[in-house]
Image: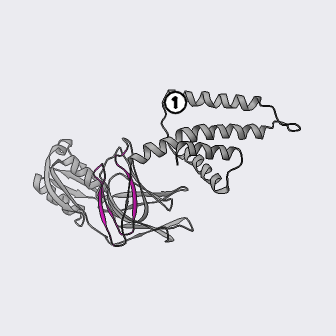
């Protein structure tokens, strides 16, 4: 749809000549206006404000038809219409159609096809058969958002503490992580959505709020009709490899804490500068990995009773 066609449709809506389908399209645009974070320059905002004011002045001074009184409801409708025409017709339509579309990539797999996708931040997505994934060519500076429209996918997310990663699904369920690996199954024809965490921690939510926080080897099933979720323990569905090539002990600890949802403390902050070169797998326990790392640096460690907190010392 061209910009001119969009304006014509909006005018039909204001003249109450739009078909039910056309009315729904315009109202959907209006809903988009409320949910999108649009960034406009000060000059652009001023121009839109001036144009709105001019339209409202004209509407307020128009002579009403004989026998009819200009009611408050009519004024509200005109004000809303002006906002709709200017804000949606000029800002939302142009920005969403041109800017956003240029940055978006859509990948669809066949019924027997799988695809490996590397995102701009280094995160990896393994897309299963009959799946559809939408993601930006380049993520925003303060957040990372992608959409699994259909199917099943395994996500291995690059850890970036200041830039959260969110997977949106067609079921209205969002999965938010900082750095971890997990699996999502979301078919539109299915009554359920499933999320399984391989390593790390994820928060699952819908429009009503948080559905649950999952850690390693936990599985969430979401009932679309009832709008509720259940969490259970599972055996590991997959394992990931992580390699450290000259990484500092601080970097190694940060990775292990997110992979296993544990806490690792150093008795001396200077230990964090020690360099580590080694490869590990998530099939190994935190204790096994720390045993190897401490052997490399001639260090010792102990663990809490629940094996959720570890202390490293000389």
- Residue 266 is situated, as x and y percent measured from the top left of the image, at 22, 48
Q: Provide the secondary structure element on which disc 1 rests.
A: helix
Quarter where residue 124 is shown: bottom left
- Residue in the image at 60% along x and 29% along y: 49
**Magenta residue check for 76:** no
| Residue bounds of the magenta highlight | 112-139
Residue 171 visible in the picture: yes
* Image quarter of residue 60: top right
Q: Is residue 106 left or right of residue 22?
A: left
Q: Magenta stretch containing residue 127, yes or no?
A: yes
Query: Mark 1 sits on what residue?
Result: 44
**Position above or below: 37 against 111:** above
Q: Residue at x 23, y 53 (%)?
A: 311
Q: Residue 57: percent from the left, percent from the top?
A: 71, 28
Q: Nearer the viewer, residue 61 or 260?
A: 61
Q: Residue furthest right?
A: 67
Q: Position of residue 259 (x, y in %)?
A: 29, 58
């Amino acid at each position: 749809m061209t910009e001119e066609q969009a304006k014509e449709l909006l005018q039909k809506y204001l003249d109450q000549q739009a078909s039910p389908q056309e009315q729904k399209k315009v109202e959907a645009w209006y809903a988009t206006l409320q949910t999108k974070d649009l960034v406009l320059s000060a000059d652009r905002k001023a121009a839109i404000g001036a144009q709105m004011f001019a339209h409202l002045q004209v509407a307020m001074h128009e002579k009403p038809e004989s026998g009819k009184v200009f009611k408050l409801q009519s004024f509200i409708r005109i004000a809303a219409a002006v906002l709709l025409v200017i804000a949606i017709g000029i800002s939302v339509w142009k920005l969403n159609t041109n800017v956003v579309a240029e940055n978006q990539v859509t990948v669809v797999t066949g019924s027997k096809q799988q695809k490996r996708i590397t995102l701009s931040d280094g995160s990896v997505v393994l897309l299963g058969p009959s799946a559809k994934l939408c993601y930006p060519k380049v993520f925003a500076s303060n957040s990372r958002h992608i959409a699994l429209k259909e199917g099943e996918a395994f996500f291995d997310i690059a850890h970036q503490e200041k830039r959260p990663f969110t997977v949106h699904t067609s079921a209205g369920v969002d999965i938010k992580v900082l750095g971890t690996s997990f699996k999502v199954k979301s078919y539109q024809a299915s009554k359920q959505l499933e999320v399984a965490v391989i390593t790390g921690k994820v928060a699952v939510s819908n429009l009503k709020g948080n559905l649950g926080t999952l850690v390693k080897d936990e599985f969430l099933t979401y009932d679309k009709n009832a709008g509720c979720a259940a969490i259970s323990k599972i055996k590991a569905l997959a394992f990931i490899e992580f390699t450290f090539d000259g990484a500092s002990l601080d970097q190694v600890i940060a990775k292990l804490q997110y992979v296993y949802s544990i806490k690792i403390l150093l008795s001396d902050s200077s230990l964090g500068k020690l360099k580590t070169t080694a490869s590990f797998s998530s099939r190994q326990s935190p204790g096994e990995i720390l045993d190897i790392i401490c052997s490399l640096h001639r260090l010792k460690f102990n663990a809490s009773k629940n094996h959720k907190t570890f202390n490293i010392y000389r």
